[in-house]
Image: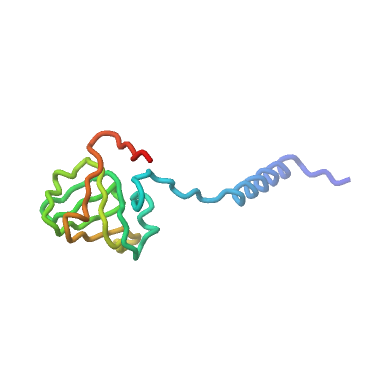
Amino acid sequence: MIRTPLTVCLPLVVVTAASAALAQTRAVPLRGLDYGPGRVDVANVRDYSGQTVSACGRIVRVDSRNRIIWVSDLLKVEVRADVDVTKLYGTVACAKGLVELKSIQGGGTYAQMLTETAAQIEQIGGTGPYTPPRR
């Protein structure tokens, strides 16, 4: 009978078990918050590239000079309408428009949207915790 040292067998068992565990795990899609019918959480906005959607989330950055808002650092929205973007900072809002993926110099992409009218930007929550609508 051939005897294999434990120092050889144990690493093989660990590698085999780890490989089996990795093969069974899958990426779990982000669930996101419920902002009501017809609205998507900005965490999933990249899934809607090339489509017109109403994407919602907290406004985390505002560039008032260039009229740009960032929704949860995931969606850049250029606001061409007559909207005071500084009043949106820290609130929960939805922006409706065509989602485009733009390239970043050095690699990667980000989602961008352009709004033309004030009706395309809707503030749905204040600066406090967001409460989803009741059905």
The C terminus - image quarter: top left
Q: Is residue 124 left or right of residue 118?
A: right
Q: Nearer the viewer, residue 135 or 130?
A: 135
Q: Nearer the viewer, residue 105 or 101?
A: 101
Quarter of the image holding residue 51? bottom left
Asked whether the viewer can see residue 92, the reply is: yes
At 43% from the left edge and 47% from the top edge, which residue is drawn? Answer: 30
How many marks do you count on the picture?
0
In the image, residue 92 lies at what x, y percent?
26, 43
Considering every residue shown, the one lying at the far bottom of the view is: 50
At 43% from the left edge and 46% from the top edge, which residue is drawn? Answer: 31
Quarter of the image holding residue 118? bottom left
At 72% from the left edge and 44% from the top edge, which residue is drawn? Answer: 8
Q: Nearer the viewer, residue 31 or 12?
A: 31
The N terminus - image quarter: top right
| Up-down relation of residue 111 to residue 56 (above or below) | below
In the image, residue 48 lies at what x, y percent?
37, 60
In the image, residue 59 lies at what x, y percent?
24, 45
| Up-down relation of residue 27 to residue 115 (above or below) | above
Asked whether the viewer can see residue 105, the reply is: no
Considering every residue shown, the one lying at the far top of the view is: 128
Considering every residue shown, the one lying at the far right of the view is: 1
In the image, residue 14 lies at what x, y percent?
66, 43
Q: How has the structure been colored for display?
A: rainbow
Q: Is residue 90 left or right of residue 33?
A: left
